[in-house]
Image (tube, rainbow, N blue to C red):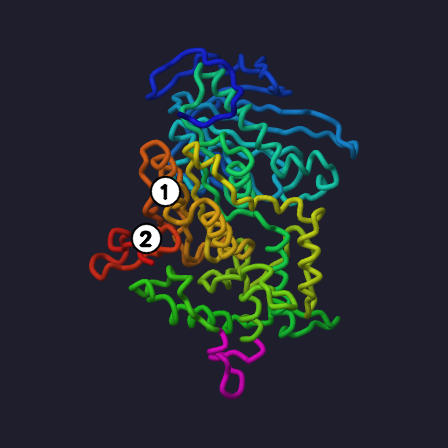
Amino acid sequence: MPLKPPVLLTTLALLSPAAFASTTSCASLTGLKIPGYDVAIKQAAVVPAGPVPAGPVGPRIEGTLPSYCRVDGTIDERTGSDGKPYAIGFAVALPENWNGRFLFQGGGGLNGSVGLPIGAQAAGSRPALARGYAVVSTDSGHKGQVFDTSFFAEQEAMLNFLYQAIGKVAPVGKAIVEAHYGKPADHSYFVGCSTGGREAMMMSQRYPRYFDGIVAGAPAMRTNFSNLADKYVTVALNAVAPKDESGKPMTAKALSESDKQLVVDSLLKACDARDGVADGMVFDAKGCGFDPKSLVCKGAKTDSCLSAAQADAIAKGFAGPKDSRGNPVYPGWFYDTGITAKTGIPGLLNPGPSPVGPPTFDTTMDVDREARIAADPKAAVGDSAHWTQLDTFFQHGGKLMFFHGVSDPWFSAKDTIRYYTEMTAANGGPEVVTSKSRLFLVPGMGHCAGGAATLDRFDMLTSIENWVEKGAAPDSVEATGQSFPGRSRPLCPYPKHAHYKGTGDREKASSFECRE
């Protein structure tokens, strides 16, 4: 049976499960009332078939979108305690030929705007809407730029951002689907990355009966601690960086371009071939034993070696912050090909300004103090997506997939591994949990996508769909990408990684298998 909230509109009719046409006109949805929710439908209009509109998802999407009814509305319009107007904004895309499925598209950053509801994340080259899914998205309860933190001062707005908004938009979106097509969705899915990945985790933890399948990418689940760890890397580099005229360290010059290239080249030399083939990618990140201290100059500093201080700074930063007793505060970072990224979101060894805080010019760091601030109940209210008890979600047949780029400089893949390991232990151990949840690491990929040496196009939507509806657990997910045209590789469920079989075309996923 499909998983859904307990209160929805009464089923109006049963239609063929193949493809459903609407039973209620698009325009008439403006008058829809949903019991139990303060909903205002602002407009409902048909969007003709055509290409994906220009924007962040445009270049990666092939083909066209079908004609669909777009419904825009709000939930709980109000004036906040700060005197500003608030509401939970949402949009629902209802395709002309519905496949009977519902997808909640996760947000990003601090939200603040309603994303185009097409379900492109982790869907390969064919978004959910193009497949016939009904798709919903939300601004999570406030308006503003992607990293505008001003709403933090309003309690209800903050609670909506953390979890309340998605908990209301999901049943409202399902009710609109049911009203339009005359029947409820057969299956419901949630897919998101970053903030959307955190929202995905919150769905499994706080709303365990809402979704059949959930895909959580690079979840922003402990932002206070990941910010602390990013700062820790920057402080380590600041300590060895030259200073400007005002005495401030120039972080970007702690390592020269030749130094950075030396690190990546040496990393590949040490770890690339561990997966059976030297191909510019590190699939066995966990088994990679690269140590920057092996690059320390024997004599004078040259482009072919690092100073002892540089090597120590890199090793210290990547090991992650530890308190005065030696206890890890954050699990640190993998050495991977994207650590010197320059475009998009900068890599750890090429740090850029934080989107939510001022730059740091510190050369030392009181980790104990920073950890206390990060763990303070008031400051850490947003770091709430780490509850490991998922028995209700799993017992109702829910399937949960994670993915994370190994080169993600904002949220470490090691922290997602930490959560997955703890969640696995709390729910019966690997033998039990692998039939319900799996984690996939993406070598070279930055935050949610991108990377100079990665394969960041993969279709986990089909994988979760097959797992939920056919019982076919994803033993691997094939990945391709612009970095290596013509190449494909399997992404393997952790702790396994792709390994060359020894024969066959080295550019084809079929020549690789998943090994521990």
Residue nearest the viewer, comparing 114 with 246: 114
Q: Is residue 420 left or right of residue 244?
A: left
Q: Is residue 17 above or below residue 116?
A: above
Q: Is residue 363 above or below residue 87?
A: below
Residues packed near mark 2 inside 10 Å, few (<14), some (14 to 19) or many (20 plus)? many
Residues packed near mark 1 inside 10 Å, few (<14), some (14 to 19) or many (20 plus)? some
Quadrant containing the N terminus in the rendered view: top left
Residue nearest the viewer, comparing 63 with 367: 367
Residue 424 in percent (x, y) is at 45, 48
* Mark carried by residue 64: none
Residue wearing tag 2: 489
* Mark carried by residue 435: 1
Task: Give the residue displayed 62% in from the left and 69% down from the top.
Answer: 236
Q: Is residue 114 above or below residue 447?
A: above
Can residue 233 be seen by looking at this rendering?
no
Disc 2 element: strand
The amino acid type found where label 1 is placed reads Ser
Residue 298 forms part of the magenta stretch: yes
Q: Is residue 445 left or right of residue 383?
A: left
* Camera-nearest label, 2 or 1: 1
Query: Quadrant of the rendered structure where residue 468 is?
Result: top left
Overall secondary structure of the magenta section:
loop
Task: Give the residue displayed 45% in from the left and 68% down from the top.
Answer: 264
Residues rendered magenta in the picture: 292-310
Residue at the front extreme of this rendering: 428
Quadrant containing the C terminus in the rendered view: bottom left
